[in-house]
Each structure stands twice: as C-alpha cells, then as structure tokens.
Image: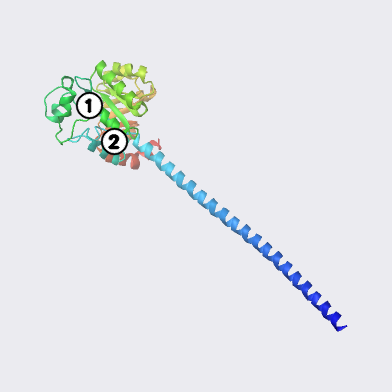
C-alpha cells in the first residue's frame, strides 16, 4: 500500500515537473517573442530615424547647392581676375576657390590657327612683346611669358585642365572666319558646347554660331545704345552685356531686354555700390574683377532681393 502511494506521489511529482517545464518553455518562448518584437521595433525606429536624418541632410545639401547655384549664376569672373595674373591658371583657380563657376576667357588666334587666351589682339600688353597675335606663330607665342611670369595659355590647355568642372564665358576677339572655325573645332574636340557661353561684339559672329550651336548661350558685347537697339530683338542673341561705364546699365535697357526674352548683363562691376545697383535693377549677370565681393553680395544681399532666383 505504501509502495503504491509512493509511486503515485512520484508520478504526481513528475507530472508537476513536466507542467513546470512546459510552462517555463512557453514563458521562455513568449518572452523571446516579446524581446524579438521589441528589438525589431527598436531597429525599425532606428532605421526610420537614420532615414529621416539622411533625408534631412540630403535636403539641406540640395538647398545649399540650389542656393550656391543661384548665387554663382549671376557672376562672371572677368579674365579670372584682372591685372598681371589675368588669364592664367592662377587667376582662374583663385576665382574658382572663391566660389565662381563662370570664368571668362578672351580668345585670339595666331597665324597658324591656334587659339590663345588674351584680352588684347596685340601681345605687348600681356607680355611686353610687340606683335599682333594674328601675325605671330604658335611657336613664338608659346615662348612668351607674361608680366607675372606665366605662359600665354592655349584655349585647349584651359579645356584640358577644367573640362566640365566650370562654365566658360568665351569672347572671340577677332572678327574672322578662321577664329570661328578654330573655336568650333576645339569645342567639338573637347565636347564642351554645353558649358560654354560665347561672346562677341560682332552680331554676325553670333548669328553664324547660332546655326551650329543653337543651344549655346550667345552674349553680345554692347558698347553703345545704337548697338543695343539693333540687337535687342535679334533671335540669335540670348544675352546682352552693356558697358556700365558708358551709362548703358539702365532700367529701361534692362526692361527692354527682358521684354524680348533675353538676359541682361553688364560689365565691369567692381564696387559694392554698382553691384547692389545692378541687383536692385534686375541685372541678371555681370562681369567683375572682384569675385569674392560679388559672390558675398549676391549671397547676403542678392538672394533676398532676387527672391532666390
């Protein structure tokens, strides 16, 4: 009898142990599930937070890039910077370092058809060597140095160095078919037609280039009111840049340019007073020898005045 009771007690104990084991297993499984759910929720929250942070950072970067583009789009760095270092890599690099993305090159052509960067048609101003570029060979020009000790740059060298990293604002100084043809050949060779604004003080040069590069912005360098009135409605002129010192940067000329669907530009603006005047007037772009000043004013004064455009 006692043996039977003992067996019964043992069975009961075993059954209780099994129940406890099963209950513990169920609790462990349930607790593990709860922990996994909590961990998954925590990881999801972290992922959402990281995604939101990344989106905010990307939005901030995009906003900054848009603001930078709005600021830089109005400023053309005149010859990189004027003076002894003009039209040198040093001048261009300084303008780029200041934040500029539109760098001007004045282009001349030698007797053997090579394009060089020089504001004047005579090499004497830049190098001290008295000779018109059109009568000099490229070998001669390659041997010249500027007052600042720099070489006279070939346009091809400028293209080679900067590629698509900047926007070129190129003035073709000579009024010749050879210059236009050499320009077209070089632009096609480097594939840079999408980052070039081409300038000329000769309307027919721009008309010629319109046929080959209809999407390339064409800037007319305007010296007189009569010239302004002649080109203001010409379909092959996209930008009219007037000489501010000649009194051509007026509200009337600005409004007339805009009324004809064109961009109004001016040159050369180097003081806070003239740059602010241009901004207030609605001048779209302008050449300057003081890139840091112009970009600073565009950011601190122009963004609000122009409405962020």
Left or right of 217? Residue 221 is left
Q: In the figure, is residue 217 to the left or right of 135?
A: right
Closer to viewer: mark 2 or mark 1: 1
User: Does 298 appear above or below 246?
Assistant: below
Q: How dense is the environment of label 1, judged by Cα within 10 Å: few (below 14), some, or many (20 and up)?
A: many
- Quarter of the rendering occupied by the N terminus: bottom right
Point out residue 196 in the picture as x, y percentages from the top left corner.
33, 27
Kindly indicate the quadrant of the structure image that contains residue 163.
top left
Q: Residue at x 23, y 38 (%)?
A: 90
Q: Is residue 74 left or right of residue 44?
A: left
How far is disc 2 from disc 1 in space, using C-alphas? 30 Å
Color style of the picture: rainbow
Q: Which residue is mark 2?
A: 275
- Residue 222 vs 65, above or below: the answer is above
Asked whether residue 90 appears in the rendered view, the answer is: yes
Q: Residue at x 80, y 77 (%)?
A: 10
List x then y, in percent, for residue 161: 29, 34
Give the answer, above or below, for where 20 lies relative to 95.
Answer: below
Asked whether 263 or 149 is in front, the reply is 149
Q: Which residue is mark 1?
A: 116
Residue 150 in percent (x, y) is at: 18, 35
- Name the residue rendered at 16%, 19% in the picture: 135
Query: Which of the pair 246/166 is nearer the observer?
Result: 166
On the image, the x and y values in percent for residue 12 come to: 80, 75
Lower position in the chain sequence, tag 2 or tag 1: 1
Circles 2 and 1 in contact, beta carbons < 8 Å: no
SS at badge 1:
strand
Between 194 and 276, which is closer to the camera in this rendering? 194
As drawn, the residue found furthest toward the front would be 3
Q: Quadrant of residue 117?
A: top left
| Picture quarter with the C terminus | top left
Res. 134 image quadrant: top left
């Amino acid at each position: 009898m006692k043996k039977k009771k003992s067996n019964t007690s043992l069975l009961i104990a075993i059954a209780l142990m099994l129940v406890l084991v099963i209950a513990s297993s169920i609790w462990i499984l349930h607790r593990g599930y709860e922990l996994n759910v909590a961990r998954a929720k925590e990881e999801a929250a972290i992922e959402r937070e990281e995604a939101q942070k990344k989106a905010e950072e990307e939005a901030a970067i995009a906003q900054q890039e848009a603001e930078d583009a709005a600021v830089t789009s109005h400023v053309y760095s005149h010859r990189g910077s004027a003076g002894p270092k003009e039209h040198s890599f040093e001048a261009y690099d300084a303008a780029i370092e200041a934040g500029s993305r539109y760098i001007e090159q004045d282009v001349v052509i030698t007797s053997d058809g090579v394009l060089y960067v020089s504001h004047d048609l005579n090499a004497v101003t830049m190098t001290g060597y008295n000779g018109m570029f059109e009568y000099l060979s490229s070998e001669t020009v390659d041997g010249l140095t500027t007052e600042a000790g720099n070489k006279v740059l070939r346009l091809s060298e400028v293209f080679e160095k900067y590629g698509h990293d900047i926007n070129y604002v190129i003035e073709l100084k000579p009024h010749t078919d050879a210059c236009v043809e050499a320009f077209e050949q070089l632009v096609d060779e480097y594939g840079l037609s999408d980052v070039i604004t081409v300038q000329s003080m000769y309307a027919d040069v721009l008309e010629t280039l319109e046929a080959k590069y209809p999407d390339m912005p064409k800037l007319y360098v305007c010296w007189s009111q009569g010239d302004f009135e002649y080109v203001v409605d010409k379909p092959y002129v996209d930008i009219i840049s007037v000489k501010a010192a000649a009194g051509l940067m007026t509200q009337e000329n600005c409004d007339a340019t805009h009324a004809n669907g064109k961009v109004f530009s001016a040159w050369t603006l180097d003081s806070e007073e003239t740059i602010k005047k241009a901004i207030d007037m609605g001048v779209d772009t302008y050449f300057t020898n003081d890139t840091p000043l112009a970009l600073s004013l565009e950011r601190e004064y122009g963004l609000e005045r122009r409405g962020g455009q």
